[in-house]
Amino acid sequence: MPVEGSEFAAALRQYAAGVVLMCVRDDIDDVGTTVTSAMSVSADPPLVAVALTTDGYPHEVLESVGSCALNVLGVQHEILASRFASAGRPSARHLLETVPWQRAEHSGGIVLDDAVTALDCRVAQLVPAGDHTLAVLEVVGVPVLEETRDPLLRLRGRWTDGAGRSFRRS
């Protein structure tokens, strides 16, 4: 018997996930989205994967452009994570007007100066998976690496830090 969608979602809410901001630069603008389904895939070659809603605009732009920047968000970024998770959000540059950032060398995607780490990536493979697509990304650069910053996590529908302290409900 198939698992009910609500039961499946409730079960996965028990799993703490790192929070990543994916930024894609296309010819018109910068597109950003919050991703909590990111994972390491391979060390040789260096590959990571993110799951994106197949019919979503971020997927469409990533497929078209073929590269992106991934920012692992820190605890100080919970408001940014909420902004980029909202439907109908404006340009990534508008949401980051007060946040210091730079462009990734290969992808041209936005890289936050105060991210925990940032990865400059190109698409290696897009794999359909139900209502999502797994974007397997080759890491071509690490423009930010700050091992002393605490990562932002998503657990039980809340932004939290590594000690389990919740921020606001979102």
Image: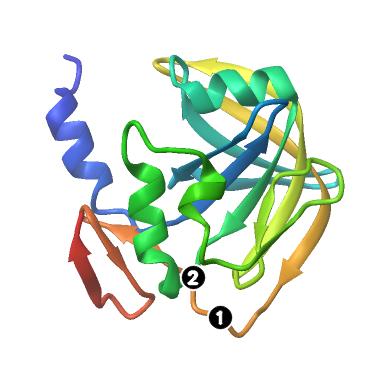
Q: On the image, numbered disc 1 is attached to which residue?
A: 149
Q: Is residue 34 left or right of residue 118?
A: left
**Quarter that holds the N terminus:** top left
Instruction: Tell me the crowding category of disc 1: few under 14, some 14 to 19, or many 20 or more residues within 10 angstroms, Cα based.
Output: some
Q: Residue at x 52, y 57 (%)?
A: 96
Q: Residue at x 49, y 22 (%)?
A: 57
Q: Is residue 106 left or right of residue 136?
A: right
Kind of residue indicated by mark 1: Arg
**Residue 39: horizontal and vertical position, in percent?**
57, 47
Q: Residue at x 76, y 42 (%)?
A: 121
Give whichever of 49, 152 is nearer the camera.
152
**Residue 65: horizontal and vertical position, in percent?**
73, 24
Give whichever of 43, 159 is nearer the camera.
159
Q: Is residue 97 left or right of residue 169?
A: right
Q: Earlier in the sequence, mark 1 or mark 2?
A: 2
Q: Residue at x 67, y 78 (%)?
A: 146
Quarter of the image where one finds residue 160: bottom left
Q: On the image, numbered disc 2 is attached to which residue?
A: 74
Kind of residue indicated by mark 2: Gly
Question: SS for tag 2?
Answer: loop
Q: Which mark is residue 63?
A: none
Give whichever of 56, 157 is nearer the camera.
56
**Residue 41: horizontal and vertical position, in percent?**
67, 43
Residue 111 vertical placement versus 34 (above, below): below
Q: Are marks 1 and 2 in contact (CB under 8 Å)?
A: yes
Report how far apart the C-alphas of labels 1 and 2 lie in the structure: 6 Å
**Quarter that holds the C terminus:** bottom left
Q: Is residue 87 left or right of residue 21?
A: left
**Residue 59: horizontal and vertical position, in percent?**
55, 23
